[in-house]
Image: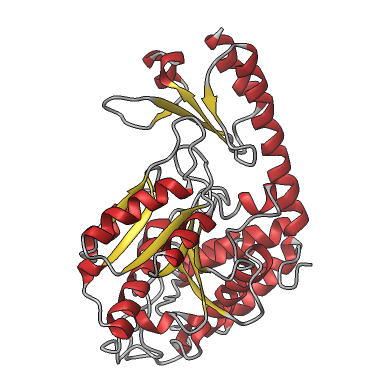
Amino acid sequence: MYQFWDKKSEEEIKEVVFNALENNVNYDEQNILGIPASYLDKNVFNQDASFLKDAPFLSTLIKNPNHIGCHTLGTSESFFAGTQEIERDLIKICAHDILNGDDDKYDGYVASGGTEANLQAIWIYRNYFKQEKGLKNEEICIITSSDNHYSMDKAGNVFSMPVQKVEVTENGRFITEESVQAAVDIQKANGVKAFVVVANMMTTMFGSIDEPEFYSTVLERDGFDYFIHVDGAFGGFYFPFSQKEHDLDFRNPKISSVTLDAHKMAQAPYGTGIFVIRKDLMHYANTKEASYVEGEDYTLIGSRSGANAIAVWMILSKYGPFGWMEKIFILQKRTAWMCERLDELKVKYYRHPSSNIITIKSEFITPEIAKKYGLVPDNHHAPKWNKIVIMDHVTIERLSELVEELK
């Protein structure tokens, strides 16, 4: 079932990471003169600390590998080949074992976050439509639900593309075929000829899920070219384990790319978004002018820390797939417990049954309670909803304190 993802002991994890660092450039022993890179400054960061021998992530930070480029495409900067191999393994785990992709039929890299990964997808598809179909920016529309992450609006700004929102139901937070058709009709009248669909795998505010078939049905019926990208920045490391059967991974041939965000549910250091895309599309983002970079550069971010990729690989290797399933199972049970308490109190809320986000109608939450418990509003100026996110530290004991206040 899991081809690339297995559970490893602490010693095995250390062995893999330290061996990878040995296969990276060694500035102390090699006479490397031509690259603008080195270890972290020794005058500030102690590289002789005894605990580093048992700290593979911190050791990687100190060694400071640059993972510029996309390592699933072949040639990359050979100075950092050791840790790049771990990043390739991480992409295999995400693409194949989590997102059900076919062997070696994907590309990807560790981005700076979900925002960059979403922009990477939209950048690629915009360039495809411009290069292959001769379309102008204003003829290519980003279409997504009104509960979308703000990165889609940012992408529209950065890439000079129109953004069209699809209305969702107020209490169910789902799109419909009719609401997609209404949104498409608006852009059809504006002269749009192709669409970049961003379907949500757990929205940031509600944890809600989009049905991608509504998009494909409408766009195919109306004769539009399109790509579907899945924004799983929140749900990528959660939803595939809480709901096995769904249409938001590579089992669906109409899904071309997916964003996962390890610095949310995987609790990796910030700066660990993951972008995965089907083969033969990544080259539309190639910057050939990066000729001094071995393998050139296909990413928005350019230079990036290899330590972030190591961190995510370590987390997934420590748990293994079955340990990860159990982690999500526990969070699901905690979320269900809280929903039962809210039902007893007749507090109105939204929760997708496969999500760990509970979003409560703001009339049931005083500003004092929201502040005390760090409940996040949908809008800081005029909140209609406040959300709870059930993370590892959000135990039933802590939730019960909020329950008592809500009584």
Residue at the spot 54% in from the left edge and 58% down from the top edge: 213
- Color style of the picture: secondary structure
Q: Nearer the viewer, residue 305 or 185?
A: 185
Residue at the spot 59% in from the left edge and 10% down from the top edge: 404
Residue 101 place in picture, x, y as percent: 63, 72
Is residue 112 in view?
no
Residue 113 place in picture, x, y as percent: 42, 58
State left or right for residue 161 relative to residue 256. Answer: left
Residue at the spot 25% in from the left edge and 77% down from the top edge: 135
Residue 222 place in picture, x, y as percent: 39, 65
The furthest residue to the front: 221
Q: Is residue 95 above or below residue 248?
A: below
Question: Which quadrant of the rendered structure holds the N terminus?
Answer: bottom right
Q: Is residue 381 above or below residue 307?
A: above
Residue at the spot 44% in from the left edge and 59% down from the top edge: 218
Q: Nearer the viewer, residue 402 or 294?
A: 402
Q: Quadrant of residue 191?
A: bottom left
State left or right for residue 296 relative to residue 234. Answer: left
